[in-house]
Image: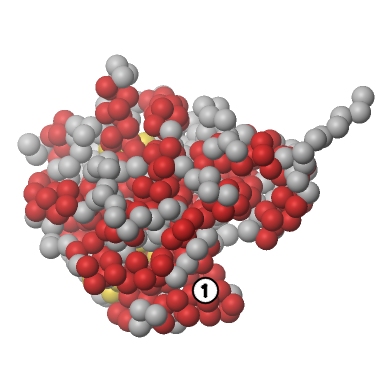
């Protein structure tokens, strides 16, 4: 039987290598990556399949879905890969390629805007109240003073991430819930 | 109690500890100097930043923000103490990358120059667990405690970004780590076996925000494995894992599931064992801990 793959993008694998997944060619599809993956059972994120799709150049199948954003970045696949193909690095590379196409989930945008406007991944006012309640010292991290936040904003303004993470100048945090940190 | 010679660290608190669990921050600030490790504030330190957002779109923007934080510790001329696994992983990774890669260091310093800062590569990054286990040592910790937790069983959760990638994080066997277990046992507790101990809590990488249902399913599997050993508490050394266990168990209870295992950051138990007051060091949680504290410390 002859299998014909339509709409393949042979440039995808080169781009993945360029964006940090430099050892992808070492993958021989053994499946060790998936065996330790904490999310494989409960989401569409299937790391072994993604590695294969990159090598086949099936960019639409990877980038048009949001499953690459469901990796918890636990690095278990990278740790256990017998070939050192670096599956987690491939996921980071795919996320970078995806972001350049404007495909990025809301949680990433929310956290990036928190960091840009507040200096931290989470809201600050609630934190100050909690600190007061337990008698913690007065906050002196980035979130305590506009001058620190200004430094962080100037760094982000100088990088691609300002555009890629859809940072907005007029932005209010959605709420006090912690949505992501590491 | 005999004190070790003082060693000074720049305390990098991150985001979750100072702004959601400042009682954990108090527990670190109050226990470490008693063991000879003095901590100094990193004024103006921002988010590490996390792998889930900035690193996921552009390496240089992640590196530049990490380098700003590292430059604050460099000006203090002190090694950096990370108290969150995520902060540890990305700050240590940035520090090693910037030390070894001249091209990236120059790119980052061009950016930092705009805000009057510079990365030099003069300090090291350590996780609190390394400092407790490798520098202070188990014997000193045993000597420092007044109350022994005899008979208490702990499910130890290391978290991912303390151990992996193992080639540049904490010096440990990544498949069979022992340092946090040894620290827990120094308090008199038994660290119990449970299946898939090294698996993820399900919070990181943006998962908690992107898929609230899946994050709870992954946590539930983790908790089922933990329940296998029927522990009295869960002990971790990462505030994001702590948050996932604390708020995640509440999320599962709201769905009618029966998960209510007390969760502690290591230094909270250490502080309680040293006789420090509960209100300052262990009073913020959605999953109740008072029963554990009353039973094992006799404190209301």
The residue sitting at 49% across, 31% down in the picture is B195
The residue identified by callout 1 is: B98
Subunit of label 1: B
Q: Position of residue A87 (x, y in %)?
A: 64, 47
State the image quarter where residue B49 is shown: bottom left
Helix, strand, or loop for circle 1?
helix
| Mark 1: few/some/many CA within 10 Å (<14, 14-19, 20+) | many
State the image quarter where residue A144 is shown: bottom left
- Viewer-closest of B278 and B161: B161
Say whether residue A170 is visible: yes
Q: Quadrant of the N terminus of chain A?
A: top right
Q: Position of residue A65 (x, y in %)?
A: 58, 36
Residue at the outermost right position: A1
Q: Is residue A30 left or right of residue B288?
A: right
The residue sitting at 41% across, 66% down in the picture is A156
Q: Position of residue A45 (x, y in %)?
A: 58, 34
């Amino acid at each position: 039987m002859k299998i014909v793959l339509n709409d393949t993008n042979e440039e995808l694998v080169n781009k993945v290598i360029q964006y940090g997944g430099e050892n992808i060619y070492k993958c021989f599809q053994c499946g060790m990556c998936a065996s330790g993956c904490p999310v494989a059972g409960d989401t569409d994120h299937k790391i072994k399949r993604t590695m294969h799709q990159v090598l086949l150049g099936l960019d639409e199948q990877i980038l048009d879905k949001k499953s690459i954003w469901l990796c918890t970045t636990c690095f278990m696949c990278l740790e256990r890969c017998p070939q050192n193909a670096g599956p987690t690095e491939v996921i980071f590379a795919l996320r970078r390629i995806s972001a350049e196409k404007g495909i990025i989930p809301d949680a990433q945008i929310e956290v990036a805007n928190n960091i840009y406007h507040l200096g931290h991944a989470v809201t600050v006012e609630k934190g100050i109240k909690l600190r007061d309640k337990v008698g913690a010292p007065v906050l002196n991290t980035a979130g305590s003073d506009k001058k620190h936040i200004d430094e962080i904003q100037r760094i982000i303004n100088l990088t691609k991430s300002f555009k890629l993470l859809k940072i907005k100048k007029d932005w209010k945090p959605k709420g006090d819930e912690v949505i992501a940190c590491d | 109690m005999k004190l070790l010679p003082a060693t000074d660290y720049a305390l990098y608190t991150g985001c979750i500890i100072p702004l959601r669990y400042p009682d954990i921050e108090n527990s670190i600030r109050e226990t470490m100097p008693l063991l000879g490790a003095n901590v100094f504030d990193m004024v103006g330190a921002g988010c590490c930043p996390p792998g889930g957002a900035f690193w996921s779109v552009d390496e240089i923007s992640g590196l530049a923000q990490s380098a700003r934080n590292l430059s604050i510790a460099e000006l203090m001329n002190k090694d950096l103490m990370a108290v969150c696994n995520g902060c540890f992983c990305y700050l240590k990774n940035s520090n090693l990358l910037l030390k070894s890669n001249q091209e990236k260091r120059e790119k980052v310093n061009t950016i930092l120059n705009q805000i009057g800062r510079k990365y030099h590569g003069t300090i090291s990054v350590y996780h609190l667990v390394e400092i407790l286990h490798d520098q202070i040592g188990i014997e000193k910790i045993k000597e420092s405690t007044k109350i022994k937790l005899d008979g208490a069983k702990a499910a130890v959760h290391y978290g991912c970004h303390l151990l992996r990638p193992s080639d540049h994080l904490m010096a440990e066997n990544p498949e069979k780590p022992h340092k946090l277990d040894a620290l827990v046992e120094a308090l008199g507790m038994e660290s119990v076996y449970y299946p898939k101990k090294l698996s993820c809590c399900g919070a990181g990488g943006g998962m908690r925000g992107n898929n609230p249902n899946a994050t709870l399913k992954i946590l539930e599997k983790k908790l089922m494995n933990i329940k296998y050993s029927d522990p009295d508490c869960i002990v971790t050394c990462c505030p994001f894992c702590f948050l996932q266990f604390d708020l995640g168990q509440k999320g599962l209870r709201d769905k009618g599931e029966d998960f209510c295992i007390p969760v502690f950051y290591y230094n909270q138990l250490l502080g309680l064992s040293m006789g420090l007051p509960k209100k300052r060091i262990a009073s913020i949680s959605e999953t109740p801990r008072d029963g554990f504290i009353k039973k094992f410390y006799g404190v209301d």
